[in-house]
Amino acid sequence: MRRLARIFWLGLKEMMSLRRDWVMIALLIWSFTLSPVMEATGVSTSVNNASIAFEDEDASPLSRSLAASFFPPEFQPVVQIQPGTGAAAMDAGRFLFVISIPPGFEKDIRSARSPEIQVLIDATAMEQAGIGANYITNILGTEIQRFAVGADLAEDSPVDLILRSAFNPNRDTVQFASVVALIGQIMWLSTILTGAAMIREREHGTIEHLLAMPLAPFDIAVAKIWANAAVVLVAAGLAMTFVLEGFLGVTIAGSKPLFLLGTALFLFTATALGVFLATLARSMAQFALLVILTILPMLMLSGGETPVEGQPDWLQVVTLILPSRHFMSSSQAIVYKGAGFETVWPEFLWLTLLGSALLMVSLALFRRSVADDR
């Protein structure tokens, strides 16, 4: 009990030290507020609120139905403009897309001719331009096919293909990217805070003061692990409630306490990794380089950037030893699919085993480092 009390009070001392480190406090606030918002909304893989105009020289029921097939939230309300003014309007920055319907378009369709529709695209908005071109092609093709079938100009398709998107029916980028961004910040911050605290103790010479007390290296390392993990866990819970759900409107399908339980298990692993990297590094600069070389590959292979199933077979086996993969998998299952403990317990078990192994290695290296310093 005395040892647990020492670890507890030493952890509180670590929190007090963090409170006086304004750089780390600013990094913590940024990472769990603005950073997830910017990552979730900054890059979109879908068309959103794109401006569009029609040059309708046909003025037929078909051309009007084509104009009516573009609606929010993907596109702004269609603006009808005078024929021949689309290029100038695009140069002025008024529209991202301009669709020009030639005269006699419906008549040519009924006569089984192949009229052309001109689509002008402002490619300076490269991301939206590329995605929007596919949207427009599919929308126009679907409407024209529907008209041709209704007018007995073409046979209906023998197969009616219906697409249903599970867990994110609107395929909203924010729903997915915001959670991935939050998980990424948890991974970065938990490792950085713990490792930086270890490096700071060494650079300031306070590690010798701690060792002069009735404290073992185990007590020092575990105190830093639980204190920094608790800070990140609280910050993650607040970010989930106020930033993701409150500000971004993300829907959490599963249990938030279960998500926080998985986060706590991962923090146990990530903070142990911070101790491990801080033991290897001899300065803050070296530690920063090690963090980049370690955390960045873990994020890229976790399944947040690209699905694990899409990676080479040998690499999928390697990712089994990465705690980031199991944390990402369990978090997405809880947040998107509403999975319960009976579904994610294997991932939790992996996190516990990997965390325990990494903690033992980190403590062994830390004891040897302290002995060498003495």
Image (cartoon, rainbow, N blue to C red):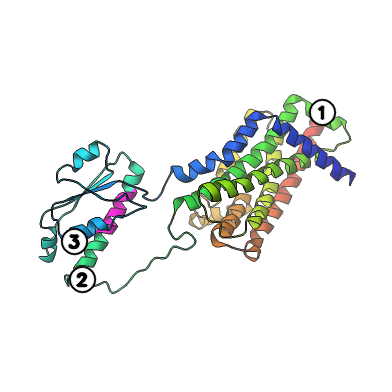
Q: CA distance from mark 2 to mark 1?
A: 85 Å
Helix, strand or loop at mark 1: helix
Q: Horizontal and vertical percent for residue 121? A: 26, 44
Q: Which residue has dot 2 on it?
A: 150
Q: Are marks 2 and 1 in contact (CB under 8 Å)?
A: no
In three-dimensional space, the C-alpha distance between marks 3 and 2, rounded to whole angstroms, equals 11 Å
Name the element at disc 2.
Answer: helix
Give the residue at mark 1. 208
What is the span of residues highlighted in magenta in the rendered image?
131-140
Q: Nearer the viewer, mark 2 or mark 1?
A: 2
Left or right, 267 with respect to 334, comes to right
Closer to the eye: label 1 or 3: 3
**Residue 303's x, y, as percent?**
53, 52
Residue tagged 3: 62
Q: Residue at x 24, y 72 (%)?
A: 156
Q: Is residue 88 above or below residue 69?
A: above
Q: Quadrant of residue 116?
A: bottom left
* Towards the viewer: 237 or 331: 237
Closer to the chain start, of discs 3 and 2, is 3
In the picture as drawn, the residue positioned furthest to the top comes out as 204
* Vertical relation: 5 (above or below) 326: above
